[in-house]
């Protein structure tokens, strides 16, 4: 929710007084020029200085009283019309203080007697000018507040749009299952139906579980390490039917990290990538290891395999590209992803510990 607040504070106290002091001097000069045109004697320095003095102190008094009042009252607290009435009363109070303060200074400079509230003609003229200028200032600030509110609304809409775009992109990434994996899994199930019906049924249930996880009906971007490891084991149970004893699989996650949050479907595409590309031609003694550790204030994930090394000019396929995209969307620049062939072929992912 965007809060609409009429505020006259556009900087610090010193900056505000300097700004309104300059305005007061300019108004005093403008009045002096106007009076000189109407005065048969023309422009007189003494009268001009007095006009500037009065204008300066009246402007500063009004500005400070309005700012002080606005600090404790706003339209949300007392209502719009009460605020407007209070604003004009502050203008008149500032006018009174400014005129009296000006006469006190004049009495000190010219050694004349000072009498409190004995300047009726000055009040009549100055009140008229004060109300006109005060109204213009009030309208300006209302316009500024409306413009700022509209700008904030647009910025909020842009933030929501970016969030929505991020969510859509993440859901698209999380809902993908490699069609080659599905094709191979279904072929394996078909081959098992006659040979081992119980195993075919178990594999079908695991495949269903994997798809439920990928569909992500709750639209969640993160899951616990425990959940991600569980779904990875489900995936590997399906793949073991196809690979048999050619590859040894191991997953080691520190128990302390079990409830820590990591991106959904972070591990499976990378493990699938290792099976599809690195270990595809390995006939025996294949190794695929996943390790999840805490190092300092980060969760560090390693995926090792002893298959073909990563090429020097690596072209990111679905597994790697989806991982890059997902990490960038969720962590911006607070993650690290390394692809190494030495001392042992592995992918290393570092993400912040929540």
Image (cartoon, rainbow, N blue to C red):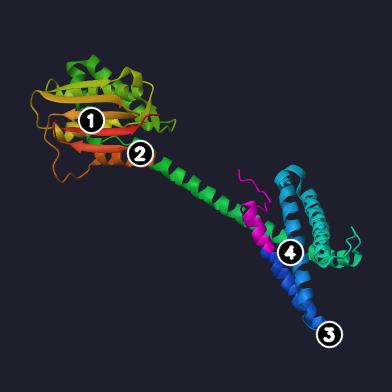
- Give me the C-alpha separation between circle 1 and circle 3: 96 Å
Mark toward the start of the polypeptide (1 vs 2): 1
Name the element at disc 3.
loop
Picture residue at 29% right of the left edge, 38% below the top: 336
Mark 4 or 2, which is nearer the eye? Answer: 4
Magenta stretch, residue numbers: 1-21
- Give me the C-alpha separation between circle 1 and circle 2: 23 Å
Q: Quadrant of residue 300?
A: top left
- Up the image or down, 337 lies above or below 51; here it is above
Asked if residue 175 shows in the view, the reply is no
**x, y percent for residue 87:** 77, 53
Picture residue at 15% right of the left edge, 32% below the top: 345
Mark toward the start of the polypeptide (1 vs 4): 4
- Give me the C-alpha separation between circle 1 and circle 4: 76 Å
Mark toward the start of the polypeptide (1 vs 3): 3
Location of mark 3 (residue): 40
Location of mark 4 (residue): 56
**x, y percent for residue 260:** 38, 24
**x, y percent for residue 117:** 90, 58
Q: Is residue 14 magenta?
A: yes
């Amino acid at each position: 929710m965007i809060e609409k607040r009429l505020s006259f504070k556009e900087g610090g106290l010193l900056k505000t007084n300097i700004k309104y002091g300059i305005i007061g001097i300019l108004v005093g000069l403008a009045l002096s020029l106007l009076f000189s045109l109407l005065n048969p004697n023309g422009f007189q320095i003494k009268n001009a200085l007095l006009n500037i003095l009065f204008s300066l102190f009246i402007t500063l008094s009004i500005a400070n009283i309005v700012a002080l009042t606005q600090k404790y009252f706003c339209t949300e607290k007392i209502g719009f019309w009460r605020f407007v009435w209070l604003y004009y009363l502050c203008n008149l109070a500032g006018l009174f203080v400014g005129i009296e303060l000006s006469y006190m200074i004049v009495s000190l400079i010219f050694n004349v007697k000072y009498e409190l509230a004995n300047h009726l003609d000055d009040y009549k003229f100055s009140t008229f000018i004060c109300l006109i200028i005060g109204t213009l200032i009030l309208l300006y600030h209302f316009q500024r507040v409306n413009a700022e509110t509209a700008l904030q609304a647009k910025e909020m809409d842009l933030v929501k749009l970016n969030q929505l775009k991020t969510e859509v992109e993440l859901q698209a990434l999380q809902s993908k299952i490699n069609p080659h994996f599905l094709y191979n899994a279904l072929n394996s199930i078909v081959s098992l139906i006659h040979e081992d019906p119980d195993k075919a049924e178990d594999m079908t249930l695991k495949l269903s579980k994997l798809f439920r996880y990928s569909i992500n009906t709750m639209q969640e971007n993160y899951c616990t390490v425990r959940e991600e490891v569980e779904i990875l084991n489900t995936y590997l149970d399906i793949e073991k039917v196809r690979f048999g004893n050619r590859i040894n699989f191991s997953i080691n996650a520190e128990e302390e990290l079990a409830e820590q949050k990591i991106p959904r479907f972070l591990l499976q595409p990378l493990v699938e990538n290792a099976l599809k590309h690195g270990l595809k031609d390995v006939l025996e003694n294949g190794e695929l290891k996943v390790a999840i550790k805490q190092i300092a204030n980060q969760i560090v994930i390693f995926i090792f395999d002893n298959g073909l090394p990563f090429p020097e000019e690596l072209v990111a396929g679905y597994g790697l590209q989806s991982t890059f995209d997902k990490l960038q969307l969720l962590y911006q620049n607070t993650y690290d992803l390394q692809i190494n062939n030495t001392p042992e072929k592995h992918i290393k992912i570092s993400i912040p510990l929540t």
